[in-house]
Amino acid sequence: MAAVSSASDTGESRGRHPPERRLLILGGPRSGKTSSANTILGLNVFDGGAETTHNNVAQTEIYGRRVTVVDTPSWAIPADTEDDEDTDTNDNAGAESESPARPPPSLDSEGPCMGAILCPPGPHAILLVVSVTQPFTEIEKKAAEEQLGALGGGTWRYSMVLFTCVDKLPKGVFIEEHIANTGEALQWLVERCGSRYHAFDNTRKETEENTQVPELMEKVEEMVTDNQGWYFEVNELILLEEEQARRALEEERMRMEEHARQREQMIGGPPRELRLLLLGWKGVGKSSVGNSILGRRFFESGQETELCLRRQALVCGRRVTIVDTPGWDWFSVRRTPKRIRQESQRGAALLRPGPHTLLLVLPVVSSLTARKRRTLLAHIATLFGDGACLHTMVLFSCGDWLGRTPIEEHILRGGRELQRLLEFCGNYYHVLDSKVPGKDRSVSVLLDKIEEMVRDNGDKAFLPIQTEWLSEESSYSSDNTEPEDDCRGCQLQ
């Protein structure tokens, strides 16, 4: 663990706006952590009615302060015959007493380290969510200890217990009495967090007299002050170990899936999976394209994308996962802020073990000059390496502007620069009308083309995640250098 202090994280603000605060939310199954995240955000951003298998991030403003909230998958509860009825795969605010047994965690489930990465450079507060309707025994105590241990040493000084479902407490019983009467395991957790705790009633989040979120942020500020403005940062060695272990598990799963695919060709099976990363300039319609492919308005279009957002849906018999990313500068890699470049790489890291296709969104109404083409290719090569060309497809947006003009004719009219861009992508391209999500029949054709690309890439079916994409400081060539032409060393297989 490394605790880092900077001017922006101290009590004094450089400008008019107070410094950002970053919250990492951890908890067991049915603890109500997703509902608590929504309460803090003031909107139902995360799906509280389903199991959280991936870390999700969102932002809001509280009294003019930007607050980043990361919701994480539930920590694993060790199997115990006496407590089988107390575990469940869902994470919501209800916390009913009768629930099915929790299945073993899958390879798709991400650990807390990934959650900490999603609020760079690290969380100011780690909120441990505990429902007052669920027992907190030695088993839950061990699970909490292992979860924080996975982040490394020094985590407890940044931790606070967040109690949920306090509306279910008997009338006249306060949270302090509940802590005293529940048992030694819960008392140990509160003491381990420096006696820092707060209580949430997630059913009150829309009432005018609700002060529980401002009160929580006041307690977070007190903790930040006690920590002298420092925040928690995951040790890079822990990240590397986690990534190596996950890669080994992923390789084993891929071998098993290869045998399963052979059987599925004859007898059918579960939906195929496609992982897609949306890339391109600012304002080219990436969010609308994502909505069109998934068939629903998952992404907020019409406004600038600030953070990567991952969404998933069943499309034409495939399980399609898409990450929308912030847009690049039109004319220079140097003018694309470093934060945006890092966010593009972080978007790829959200598609474990790597994206099958980088969808380079290009409006049919825009002209492509030599400088624009070089800038696009420079972004791809700088951020994702020379091998990215094997996995890149040009996706023309605003296809309705073509009318009855075939896309091939548009490409011929587009000139040599557009044709050179398509040659870089192995002449993989598609045109999409992203006006009405779910109404474009060409989505199925697009997915067929992506699967064709995956087959053509053979044993390089996807772009593998690089370790540096998971760290705050990514390995760019330099802020003052920019490739001047194509990635000439990249050859299609």
Image: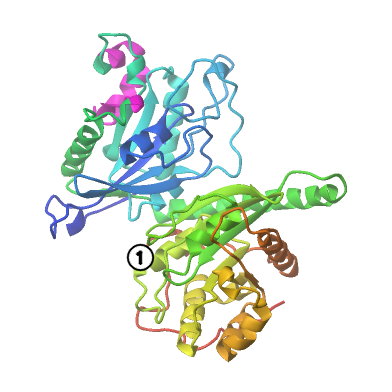
Residue at the spot x=70%, y=65% of the render?
A: 454
Left or right: 464 as drawn, with respect to 95: right
Magenta residue span? 177-203
Location of residue 74 with respect to 276 vertically, above or below: above
Coordinates of residue 111 in the picture (x, y in percent): 49, 43
Q: Quadrant location of residue 163?
A: top left
Q: In which quarter of the image is the C terminus?
A: bottom right
Residue at the spot x=38%, y=50% of the render?
A: 234
| Count of number-bearing discs | 1
The residue indicated by pointer 1 is 339
Coordinates of residue 58 in the picture (x, y in percent): 38, 48
> Could you tell me if residue 469 is visible in this image?
no
Coordinates of residue 217 in the picture (x, y in percent): 22, 38
Location of residue 4 with respect to 48 vertically, above or below: below
Q: Quadrant location of residue 147?
A: top left
Who is closer to the viewer here, 484 or 432? Answer: 432
Location of residue 324 with respect to 488 vertically, above or below: above
Who is closer to the viewer here, 106 or 440? Answer: 440
The stretch drawn in magenta includes residue 182: yes
